[in-house]
Amino acid sequence: MEILLVGSDNEFMRSLINKLNKEGHRPYVLTGNKNQVGAYKNAYERYRFPYDSDCLKEIFDSVKPDVTIFLGVYDYNFDWSDPRKESVRFLTALQNILTSFSTLKKGRFIYLSSEEVYSQSYPNDIPESEETSAISFKSVAITQGEEVCRNYRQTMGVDTLILRMDHLYMLPDKDQGDNPVVVDSNICSRMCVEAVRTGHIQANANKKFSLLYVDDAVEALYKVVNGVELKLNLYHVSSGELIDELKLAKMIQREMGNGVSIIDNTVGNVLRVVLSNHAFASEFGLTIFHHVGDVMEKMVKYVQKNRSSFVQLEDVGEGRRGQLKQRLRVIINALIPFIENLICFIPFFMLNNRAVGSRYFANLDFYLLYVLLFAIVHGQQQATVSAVLAVAGYIFRQMYHRTGLEVLLDYNTYVWIAQLFILGLVVGYMKDRLRTIRNETRNEVKYMESQLDDIQDINTSNVRIKNMLEVQLVNQNDSFGKLYEITSSLDQYEPSEVLFYAAEILAKLIDSRDVAIYTVANRSYARLFSATSPRARELGNSIEYTKMEDMYHLIKEKRVYINRSMDARYPLMADAIFAEDEMQLILMVWGIPWERMTLSQANMLVIIGYLIQNAVLRANRYLEALENQRYLEGTRVLGEEAFRSLVKAYLTARNKGLTECTFLKVDIGAHDIEDAGSQLTKLMRQSDYIGQMQGTIYVLLCNTNATDADFVMKRFANIGYQGYIQEEMNI
């Protein structure tokens, strides 16, 4: 299936993409943001356009999705910090998406809602029939989004579905740790981040709810995606495991250790909001694989490992004291190199004083070593500081024996200072340059790694296409030579048998057990000629094909109809066979899996139809050429030889389950066969046959059982002819 996902890049989106890829579907993504936000790894195609873009209709026309999933409240493109403003943007985006989707006239639209539409306390689990009780701007916007979907369903016939997820939770995104929308997206991540930021967790034991992990939500959503005929257009998805904030806080405290305290804010009345999953579970089945206790251990480790991504300056500790501590920590970290420089200056100053009168170390410049050391370790900035300290120490030592003026007037002092600064700054510059090159290299490696991820995505897509082409090439049943070889076998059958075996051959080539061939009786109705299974007969022996608008508009234009909406009123695929621009036959196929309802399969059906058409036309021309020999002169009564051949064909087809038929023997009394045949023909359908065998009139009723044959016999009796059902052995 082609599935379009609409929303931002988060764990929910990534899990959904991985699930769809694993099941062999093609996930397309409409990001809702034109900027490069999120990689959307493993997505088949990405469309980076905002929701108010004018090209949304072109995107839907290009993808032609069988299912469209809008993340809704779980879409982080919407910042609910200003809910009044964001609610307008949210509803406008939904309207634009639904308007573009409705132009397709196919597919299903799934809108993801949440338990936030209920703001009151409910003593029992909340069923889908319960009226919403939204209060806040955000919850009202979510509720109005549901109403928009319902309106499109009722007024425009769009197949929309609403899924309410009960307290969905997932890991917070470390790359967006400063985004409050991401951090506060669910109560579990909010408590974990609050614990590492402030050292304690605030909890209210009166708030009771049920938590649903993102992987379980994806499994439930996938079941809905695969659903053909849904009983409801609104479902609740919930784990059904009741918990309160205090119990959840204790779980987090136990995983984080004693460094985290719990502030019990239990006040007010009990607020219980738990969605009932009874309707969903009874229709689709629901198994919860991830329980809160197991996921909390994983979430706490993740948040602690990426602590720096979630902890901000203004969030550390409570009040000004915590902020002051964090500011002092930043200042101390910046001062450490300077303090280190001052401390190291003291031993080098002492070594330099001892070396002045030494016989062995008089020519060793300890100040130069000191400057070079800090230039190599810390770079140009600390080299400058160490050079200034070294100059001060040198002048201070020289003033032991000379005045300050004499030291300043000595050109050797300036030569020594020049070499000290030149060497220190050059080495420091090289150190800074190396550090810059290393950082640039690291950034380039990260960029190349991201490029590699994109290449891997492209390669995955290419491999998937390559495998599909390999299967198509290896499978000899799909080759044109094989198709012609099988369909040409129709030439060996009698003209009256061609259409029966055409259905059998079509079922073999298309790899489906459910195939039906209808013959067009007039410009409105078609009669069932042959079918390979009971399912292929479900539409009935006679259909008004012009009323099947979705199918009729395509096949009359000589195009293949593909039932991508899985409408039970239509076959999964259909094609028509024409003769001189007149529709003669309609080929219908059921029992095809989703992955094979492709353009390639449609083209193969067209080719098989043309090959069958050739065999049918040859048979019809042969019968037309022998028409004078087949019928009694001046009547539509088949001669004995022609009728026996026809009877044999129908009996063989009936024994193979390709058709239903009933034979009647008609007692014409003293009437002439020609006169009786003329009268009986007027009471028969165009698809039935009348013939003469051993001087007696027989009637062949196509696609008719014994019960339906009673109606025909009553008509015959009304004009004085008695009919009797004949068994096969008597015929």
Image (spheres, grey):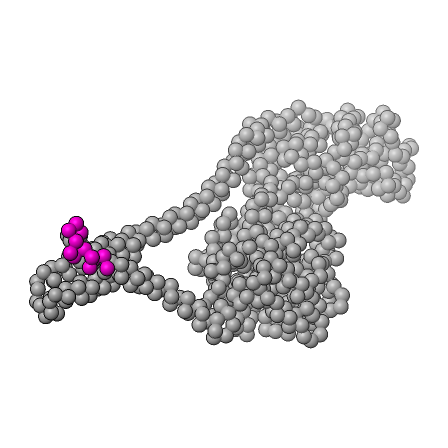
In magenta segment, residue 605 = no
Q: Position of residue 664 (x, y in %)?
A: 85, 34
Residue 126, image quadrant = bottom right
Is 361 in front, or is 688? 361
Residue sitting at x 74%, y 57%:
279
Q: Position of residue 541 (x, y in %)?
A: 76, 42
Q: Where does the C terminus fall, quadrant-wise?
A: top right
* Residue span colored magenta: 350-361
Q: Is residue 208 left or right of residue 17?
A: right
Q: How many marks?
A: 0
Picture layout, residue 666 above or below residue 562: above
Residue 539 appears in the picture as rendered: yes
Is 330 in front, or is 185? 330
Is 576 in front, or is 228? 228
Residue sitting at x 69%, y 58%:
238
Residue 263, image quadrant = bottom right
Q: Position of residue 636 (x, y in %)?
A: 76, 34
Q: Is residue 251 left or right of residue 693?
A: left
Residue sitting at x 70%, y 52%:
286
Residue 694, image quadrant = top right
Residue 565 appears in the picture as rendered: no
Picture layout, residue 361 above or below residue 637: below
Q: Is residue 358 left or right of residue 92?
A: left
Residue sitting at x 69%, y 28%:
495
Q: Position of residue 196 (x, y in %)?
A: 53, 63
Picture layout, residue 635 above or below residue 546: above
